[in-house]
Image (cartoon, rainbow, N blue to C red):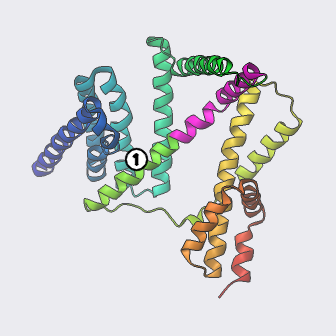
Amino acid sequence: MQKNQTSYLTYGSMMIALFAILLALTVYVPVVSVFVTFIVPLPIAWYSAKFERKHALLVTLIAVILAVLIGGIVGLVFGLFLAPLGFVIGNSIRTSQSKFYILMASSIYLLIISTILYITFILVLNINILTQLFEFLEIFYKEVGKIMDLAGQLPANYDEKTSEILLMFKMVVPFVYIALVFIHAFIYVTLSLFLLKKLKLDVPKFSKFMDFRLPKAVLWYYLIVSICTLFGSFEIGTFGYLLFVNAALILRVLLFLQGISLIHYYFYVQGWPKWSAVLATVLAIPLYTFTIILGVLDLGFNLRAFLKDRYKK
């Protein structure tokens, strides 16, 4: 018992110290921070994968407190993002969760904490990053318009067109926000699991992309959103328009991935080389609409079962 207690205290101190060093580099060395920030959760992830949850939670809490002492408000933001993220990754490994589960859990955590911090900045510090971004874009477009006007190259209805572009950008902000969160979570999870594997931990792997399958409920969601978009009358800028535009974008991306997964499965059952599937994936991007239709058909009619029976060896 004494040996185990000494073990988790020793390793806990070491991981907290390593986390503090990496966090300090992220906060105070801008050039290095671009790369270091993606490995800051690693010490907490390793510890959480090796030791009990109660010990890992304590180490995570101490790491967050230490982050505040190191970097103040900036350190707190990084600490709240990265220390619990390491705990989520490590604890999921310790409980033998799948890689997809780790990715989703990490994405949801980053989504929740970023939303909380965004609201906190507005209420406490009166700082709205999005409002400042839109104001900057409006000033930018006005200055560009003045330059083009002086050069005699100002297009007709320039103000109306720029207003429409800015409004559309505002409408898709939630989609862009969610997409960026998932991309960051994917990078953190992929890199962390790769490095933890190098440290001799048993980490899960993603199943093959051709086995990617969405729940059938996604098809019903897409059908409902499509019907509401076609027959509903939502004024641009309203909450309803914001909701359905972003829901449609998210669902189309998911069905696009479903379609590409079907293409990979088809190439597999045909026995074609992997490079041909990669080439088909690249070609699927300009054929975005057709690929979505493939995803819908696969989800609705289970085309894989048909392909499996048809090309069964």
Q: Pointer 1: residues within 10 angstroms few (<14), some, or many (20+)?
A: many
The percent coordinates of residue 50 (x first, y second) are 26, 53
The percent coordinates of residue 5 (x first, y second) are 14, 46
Q: Residue furthest front?
A: 151
Q: Residue furthest bottom?
A: 313
Question: What type of secondary structure mainly makes up the magenta span?
Answer: helix
**Is 206 in front, or is 249?**
249
**Is 119 in front, or is 132?**
132
Specify the segment rendered in magenta: 157-180
Disc 1: which residue: 188
Residue type at tag 1 = Tyr
Q: Is residue 288 magenta?
A: no
Q: Quadrant of the C terminus?
A: bottom right
Counting labels gives 1
- SS at badge 1: helix
The percent coordinates of residue 256 (x first, y second) are 67, 55
Q: Is residue 98 above or below residue 11?
A: below
Q: Is residue 168 magenta?
A: yes
Report the residue at 26% width, 33% height from top: 29
